[in-house]
Image: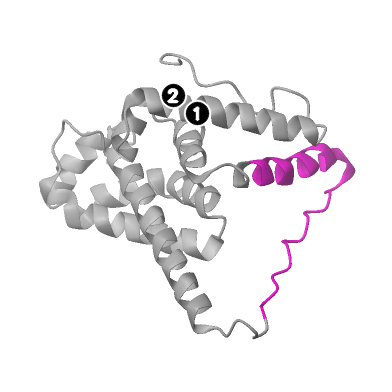
Amino acid sequence: MAADQTDEQLMRRFQRGEARAFETLMLRHRTPVYSFLLRLTGERTRAEDLAQETFMRLVKGAATWEPRAAVRTWLFTIARNLAVDAARRQAFRATESLDATSIDGPRARHAPPAATGPGPDEEAEAAQLRPRLEAALASLPAEQREVFLLREHAGLSFPEIAEATGVNENTVKSRVRYALLALRERLAADGVVAGAAAAPRGGDAP
């Protein structure tokens, strides 16, 4: 199967029953989807499970897909919605657990994640910067983090992000802008030079 076929061409082939077309789609998007989910959830196991479920949903919904919807946008929309649903379920379970615990009972204490140590000398700068970037991303409000990741990591356009998140395009642009400002402030406070958080991608920037 030609490597230069578009996602939409591959999806059409898959709709006609060509299983290898789906394999190509999965190989093309598996790593970006997993990386997006990992940064969105902060948990490797959950990200792996959600990534697997994302492609299962793509298989189940393939018959109803229409060319007017970009496959990549649809895929990241599925991934984002699964992550949101999982977070809601986790929050609900946590609330139930608190309700079931005696007010005088012991409270579990969760140690903060261990800081990532520096790598070899030639990689020290990158090794020190990465955990700061991850921590800065994790500190963003969920709605800002998801649009920032969809924009800068997944590479979706503002209209595509609006479609994926169900909010209007101006709201998406505002959230990306606030996310960038917050990231720059956090990184500056950590001594990281301005520019570590890149400006929005060109083309349809606000």
Using residue 99 as the reference point, say whether residue 109 is left or right of it: right
Circle 1 Cα neighbour tier, 10 Å, few/some/many (<14 / 14–19 / ≥20): many
Proximity of marks 2 and 1: CB atoms separated by less than 8 Å:
yes
Residue 37 magenta: no
- Up the image or down, 139 lies above or below 95; here it is above
Residue 150: percent from left, percent from top: 44, 36
Mark on residue 47? none
Residue shown at 27% from the left, 32% from the top:
6
Q: Between residue 101 and residue 165, name the one nearer to us.
A: 101
Circle 2 Cα neighbour tier, 10 Å, few/some/many (<14 / 14–19 / ≥20): many
In the current view of this chain or complex, which residue is farthest to the front?
103
Q: Between residue 68 and residue 148, name the one nearer to us.
A: 148
- Total numbered circles: 2
For the residue marked with disc 1, what is the amino acid? Val
Using residue 3 as the reference point, say whether residue 111 is left or right of it: right
Name the residue carrying label 1.
176
For the residue marked with disc 2, what is the amino acid? Lys
Residue shown at 27% from the left, 38% from the top:
71
When asked about the image quadrant of residue 181, the answer is top right
Q: Is residue 157 visible to us here?
A: no
Marks 2 and 1 sit apart, C-alpha to C-alpha, by: 5 Å
> What quarter of the picture does the N terminus occupy?
top left
Residue shown at 16% from the left, 43% from the top:
13
Name the residue carrying label 2.
173
When asked about the image quadrant of residue 195, the answer is top right
Residue 135 magenta: yes
- Up the image or down, 167 lies above or below 81; here it is above
Q: Which residues are magenta?
A: 107-136
Residue 54: percent from left, percent from top: 33, 55
